[in-house]
Image: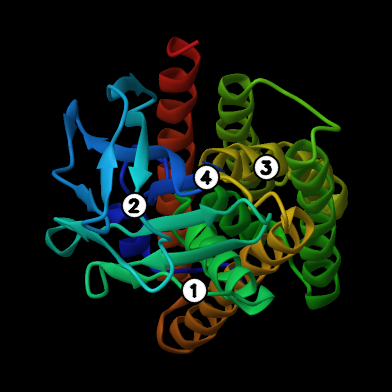
Amino acid sequence: MKFFLLLLFLLLPLNADEVRPCYLELIENTANNFSVVFKVPAKGDKKLSLQAVLSQSCAISTPVRTQFRKSVYTEKYNIKCQKSLAESIITIEGLQNTRTDLLLRLEFLDKTSQSTLLTPSNNSYKVQKSASSLQVVETYTWLGITHILLGFDHLMFVFALLLIVDSMRKLLLTITAFTLAHSITLAGSSLGLLYLPQKPVEAMIALSILFLAVEIVNEGKGVKGITSKYPWIVAFIFGLLHGFGFAGALAEIGLPQNAITLALIFFNIGVELGQLVFVATVTLFSFIFARFMTNNILSLTRTVVVYLIGITSTLWLIERVISF
């Protein structure tokens, strides 16, 4: 468990913000009248060229209000439709030319909702007459998986833990502690029971990675720190912070009001599935490369990777503190 592909971290971008999906929300306020929220990430300061195309029976009924914040353009307006949206097609023009997804969420007067994830290869959705809970399960599980697998700072923290853990028993305890901790704060924050400002949380997440990098370097010098002795304790403490980070991402996505608990549970399950995929991949490649590389090469590569982790997390920390 002391080696992974150096290429992985050479290819990681210095900006650790995950690739966030676009977001389109339609909430029915009165019969066939909807308030619309359309969030589109920016490339630099340029908005992705996307347009929501609804039924021909619908028209914008209020001025479009636009806001640019945290690299996201948000448009808010109302639409008035001549008939129900059921059986109509909602298309996101331009999505096929991007590499991002879009979460579409609809809420109706009868408190039912529909959620789906549109992709570049499937950029339209036929509004159902009625939707099952399975739709929420599928959508939020996939959102959880993609969030963790594209959240490079979260993955780097988990990877650093794997570098410092030296037994399968410790690994199981450590991953379990991390999972339990971020599940607690993810749920508490999403339900409004806990709160921490997002920018300090993101800075502390970067600091947690830097802390592990320093611990690994010290261990190589023969000085064992608390992480080497009790990795599950460190994983639990910092896992609480990472949970607030997950909650911040989920808050930007939004939760269906009639299925908050269900969406929250399966978003968390998706995060865990993605995390398990990552851990299994690291373990597999570690085993394969350890069989074909000499100890000297393994040791050198591990050292280079640890210093890359330390440098990258330091840059993230500086960047995030400056953004306060």
Residue drawn at x 36%, y 42% as measured from the top left: 80
Q: Nearer the viewer, mark 2 or mark 4?
A: 2
183 and 22: which one is in front?
22
Report the residue marked by disc 4: 27
Q: CA distance from mark 2 to mark 3?
A: 45 Å
Q: Residue at x 65, y 20 (%)?
A: 197
Residue where numbered disc 2 is placed: 82
Secondary structure of the residue carrying tag 4 is: strand
- Name the front one of labels 3 and 1: 3
What residue is pinned by disc 3? 242
Q: Earlier in the sequence, mark 1 or mark 4?
A: 4
Q: Earlier in the sequence, mark 1 or mark 2?
A: 2
Q: State whether residue 120 is above or below residue 264.
A: below
Residue mark closest to the camera, 1 vs 4: 4
**Mark 4 surroundings: few (<14), some (14-19) or many (≥20) residues within 10 A:** some
- How far, Cα to Cα, is label 2 from label 4? 16 Å
